[in-house]
Image (cartoon, grey):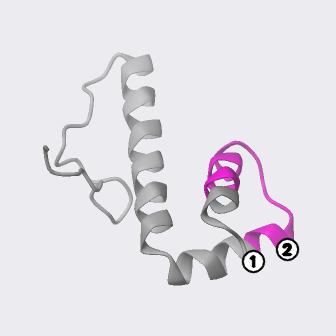
Amino acid sequence: MLSCKEATRLMSQKMDSKLPALERLSLTFHLLICHGCRSFGSQLRFMRKAVRCIADGSETPGQDAVVGDQKPVIPPPP
């Protein structure tokens, strides 16, 4: 079983290159049971899309922008 630290590393790595089959499978199983890592993945995809929008010179996605099928999880202010 992957730790959350390992899972977040794999999610980041997965955005740049294809993961080996065993790592993909381990990450998939971890994400099935870990809400925190699923939220991290949503935020990672949102940030990547925002950076691409900035780099392209287009409008940046706002807080309510939908990335994929999920809205980003934004913590409430303290």
Q: Seen in the image, is 15 located left or right of residue 71?
A: right
Q: Nearer the viewer, residue 9 or 19?
A: 9
Q: Nearer the viewer, residue 17 or 76?
A: 76
Q: Seen in the image, is 33 located left or right of residue 77?
A: right
Q: Badge 1 is on which residue?
A: 25
Local packing at callout 1 (Cα closer than 10 Å; few below 14, some 14-19, many 20+) is few
- Residue 17 vertical position relative to residue 6 in the rendered view, above or below: above
- Residue 70 vertical position relative to residue 75 in the rendered view, above or below: below
Q: Amino acid at mark 2?
A: Leu
Q: How many marks?
A: 2
Place of residue 59 in the rendered image (x, y in percent of width and height, measured from the top left): 24, 25
Residue at 68% of width from left, 71% of height from top? 27
Residue at 14% of width from left, 44% of height from top? 78
Q: Which mark is residue 22?
A: 2
Q: Nearer the viewer, residue 17 or 30?
A: 30
Q: Seen in the image, is 54 located left or right of residue 10?
A: left
The outermost residue toward the left is 77
Q: Quadrant of the N terminus?
A: bottom right
- Residue 13 vertical position relative to residue 5 in the rendered view, above or below: above
Residue 43 lies in the magenta stretch: no
Q: Hey, which quadrant is residue 23 in on the image?
A: bottom right
- Residue 41 vertical position relative to residue 1 in the rendered view, above or below: above
The outermost residue toward the front is 78
Is the residue under label 2 in contact with that under label 1 (CB below 8 Å)?
yes
Residue 15 lies in the magenta stretch: yes
Place of residue 44 in the rendered image (x, y in percent of width and height, measured from the top left): 47, 47
Residue at 32% of width from left, 63% of height from top? 70
Q: Amino acid at mark 1?
A: Leu
Q: Which residues are magenta?
A: 8-24
- Looking at the rendered structure, the secondary structure element under dot 2 is helix
